[in-house]
Image (cartoon, rainbow, N blue to C red):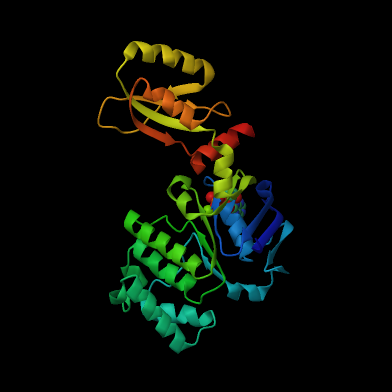
Amino acid sequence: MTALLEAVEISKRFGEFTALNNVSISVPKGSIFGLLGPNGAGKTTLIRIINQITMPDQGNVTLDGAPLEQHHIQDIGYMPEERGLYKSMKVGEQVLYLAQLKGLDKKEASKRAKYWFDKLDIGDWWNKKIQELSKGQAQKIQFIVTIMHQPKLLIFDEPFSGFDPINANLIKDEILQLREEGATIIFSTHRMESVEELCDHIALINKSQKILDGEINAIKRQYQNNTFDIGVKVTDEVAYKSFLGDLSNTYNVSKAQFKTLGNEEKLRIEMGSKGSPNELLSKFKLFGQVSHFVEVIPSVNDIFIQTVNQNK
Ligand code: ADP
Ligand code: MG
């Protein structure tokens, strides 16, 4: 897959403090790329470098194969973490003004603004001032301003913070739609668990360093360890107890946490390379009714914690 954006060996210090230490990312064309990591990891610093707001001390960035230059700003839609709109300007006026700064003529800007205001169901805000809107409402305006000129690269820094769950979902859907239409999207978040379904590629950043990156399903496959959550309504207690003893000698067995309405035995079994799920299932069937048999897919958050611990 060809990369739209590549950041190569980026380092950035603020005085004695290293905010980014030799970080590289390669963002495939047409992907949704999640820049994930806790607060203070360096995500915003990297995003600001990509937007030419901050200069790196070391490393370089290319867009479509060309070193970043001033004119590339037109090709990027950027929604900063610190949202900035003119508080006392009317919403509609402001959206048209900012769209024209990005190269749209007034007629086209009006047409697109109307489309987005209808789509996000906020037509009645047109004549309000930004200061009359809530934080989440202002953020919707900022979102429209970011995407309206249809740049090939969209960068959202913590796009979901400040949104309630309904609006966060709305924005998620819009981001998916933008990818369908051909955009490439980078977004950052410290809330890894809530957004992983959105990304097809991720980079995990921790304490100024990239600790893992790649295609999300490939990463998950690598970290998945043939692990299953099993629920069984045991009918033959004695035989089951002895079976469980054997099982614990072969596999890593622990209690599983999942919801059921009955009083099933709940186990998590990590098989690794020893055995297949079908074999396991057929053994359990001998001792009762199997009500639950689900492969455990590691979350990005689990993978993050595991990788951080490995690198200690
Ligand atoms: P993230 O977005 O992952 O939460 P940031 O990139 O904002 O992290 O910040 C990474 C670290 O760099 C933080 O410890 C932050 O305090 C520091 N930092 C960021 N910008 C500056 C700056 N302009 N001056 C000094 N320190 C900064
Ligand atoms: Mg940040």
Q: Quadrant of the C terminus?
A: top right
Can the viewer see residue 129?
no
Identified at 48% across, 41% down, the residue is 299
Q: Name the spot of residue 303 as percent of width and height, x first.
A: 54, 39
Q: Name the spot of residue 167 as percent of width and height, x first.
A: 35, 60
**Figure quadrant of residue 8:** bottom right
Q: Name the spot of residue 124 as percent of width and height, x first.
A: 28, 76
Which is more toward the observer, 220 or 203? 220
**Figure quadrant of residue 228:** top left
Q: Is residue 103 left or right of residue 289?
A: right
Q: Residue furthest left?
A: 261
Identified at 48% across, 31% down, the residue is 277
Query: Does residue 198 sit above or below 284 in this rendering?
Result: below
Identified at 39% across, 56% down, the residue is 162
Q: Quadrant of the N terminus?
A: bottom right
Query: Does residue 246 sit above or below 4 in this rendering?
Result: above
Can the viewer see residue 260?
yes
Image label count: 0
Query: Does residue 119 sit above or below 261 in this rendering?
Result: below
Which is more toward the observer, 79 or 309? 309
Q: Is residue 38 left or right of residue 212?
A: left
Q: Name the spot of residue 308 as percent of width and height, x first.
A: 59, 36
Which is more toward the observer, 46 or 276? 276
